[in-house]
Amino acid sequence: MGYQFVKSAAAFAEAKEYIPGGVNSPVRSFRGVGGTPPFIARAAGSRLYDIDGNEYIDYVGSWGPMILGHAHPAVTAALQKAVLQGTSYGAPTLLETELAQLIRLAFPSMELVRMVNSGTEATMSVLRLARAYTKRSRIVKFVGCYHGHHDSLLVKAGSGAATLGVPDSPGVPASVAGGTISVPYNDADTLAQVFAQYGEDIAAVIIEPVAGNMGLVPPCEGYLQKVRDITSSYGALLIFDEVMCGFRVAYGGAQALFGIKPDLTCLGKVIGGGLPVGAYGGRRDIMEHIAPAGPVYQAGTLSGNPLAMSAGIATLRTLTADPDMYRKLTGKTAALAVGLRNQAERYGLSLQFHQLGSMFGLFFTDQPVYDYDSATTADTEAFAVYFHTMLENGIYLAPSQFEAGFMSAAHSEADIAATIAASAKAFAKVAERNRTK
Ligand SMILES: N[C@H](C=O)CCC(=O)O
């Protein structure tokens, strides 16, 4: 008997009566691949369990935060301890300073750190800061990079927006979007041209240094240094959005991996251990413009929430307790990459498989993928066939090839072998579909 989604289908129908599209974030609806999203009942280690009783090896990891796996004992113990002491105070705690210290140890460029509640909030706040600090108005972003859903950055966005084909959402005022210039990722020449034209009015460049929201697209060699040089020469700030790749491609994120020092950095996901959190930080002279140290207003009732801080601290301390943690994460992800590539080759499929640290991405195209346009040469129908075959064989992937996959410390060699075996079946189906279409 294969996987059944009877209870999930009923739950989805009921959810649509109360929640727009039945979900609280569009990508969860499976709109890009079709079908019913499994409603999840619980998770442990590398596994998800849905309300129909199906079990999955999970490579979504709640879209990145679950680097230790689900319900890791260190995280659940920290949460159990914290919850008994109250869930929110709206007042300073020692936990906030402790997490800020851990973040600065990992990301020395973040001399001061402000906690917020999501990655969107971090990128939204950091743009206000950049505009205030530089007294300039324009922002540059990269086509296909996604920095959350606030107005200034929901312009040529990746993630759910690209998946759904609505890169510019209705409701984003033209006057706001007009202040954001979008340029292709991995193309330093176009960035230089934009600066030649608008450089005196560009407050900041915001970039996912490893683009995880158009699938996984790493920077070309030397590219980030060029972006750093261009921004510095015009006095614009360089903002690394490491919400996704921070603590993923290396403990110190892309800035440690590639040796580039941004002026400001945004974090989220891993630093909350699965609870809602975000953070931004950077050069002290810039961050001291944030209220109450300075005049740039930004606030939050739940910012620095003790549960989120506790889960984040437990996660970062567990990550550093094992000196071999990142070598193992990278090794497992590489083993998955090799296995998938071999299976794809066996079925005569041309795929682009990218991997960096514990992140990976897979594109059904024979073209090299280095930016949004090349990513969208990928065959989304082939991906949908692959995705559903994987799901029905117990492998839970992001329901879009324009989203990265994530390995966790909890994934075992047996999990990886099972994933490669399921991929053989899925690639066979894609090859069959290609023959008959
Ligand atoms: N790519 C998005 C965030 O990282 C996926 C999560 C979402 O949109 O719900």
Image: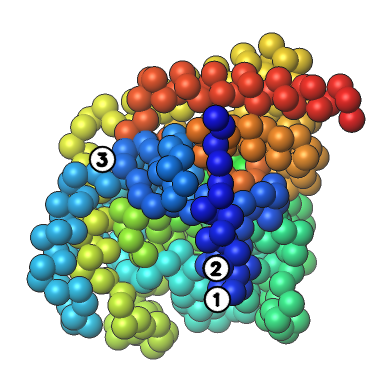
Q: Ligand 1 sits in which quadrant? A: bottom right
Mark 3 to mark 2 CA distance (whole Å):
37 Å
The way the protein has been coloured in the rendering is rainbow
- CB contact under 8 Å: marks 2 and 1: yes
Counting from the top left corner in percent of width and height, residue 156 is at 72, 62
Residue type, label 1 = Tyr
From the viewer's perspective, is the residue at label 3 or at label 2 nearer? Answer: 2
Query: Relative to residue 389, is residue 336 depicted above or below?
Result: above
Q: Do the residues labelled 3 and 1 touch (CB within 8 Å)?
A: no
Which residue corresponds to mark 3? Answer: 319
Image coordinates for residue 167, horizontal then vertical, percent: 73, 63
Q: In which quarter of the image is residue 347?
A: top right
Question: The disc labelled 3 sits on which kind of residue?
Answer: Leu
Residue 344 quadrant: top right
Percent from the top left, x then y, of residue 64?
A: 44, 48
Q: Which of 321 and 161 is in front in this view?
A: 161
Mark 1 beta carbon near ligand 1 (under 8 Å): no
User: Considering depth in this image, is 359 or 100 the residue closer to the camera?
Assistant: 359
Q: Tell me the residue that label 1 is attached to.
A: 18
Which residue corresponds to the image point at 53% horizontal and 61% vertical from the top-left? 11
- Return the residue at label 2: 15
Instruction: Give residue 148's mark.
Output: none
Q: Characterize the local packing of mark 2: few (<14), some (14-19) or many (20 or more) Cα atoms within 10 angstroms.
A: some
In the displayed structure, would residue 280 be above or below residue 129? above
Horizontally, is 79 left or right of 50 in the view? left
Type of the residue with mark 2 = Ala
Q: Residue at x 74, y 77 (%)?
A: 170
Above or below, 86 against 104 in this view is below
Q: What element carries label 1?
A: helix
Residue 80 placement (x, y as % from top left): 15, 59
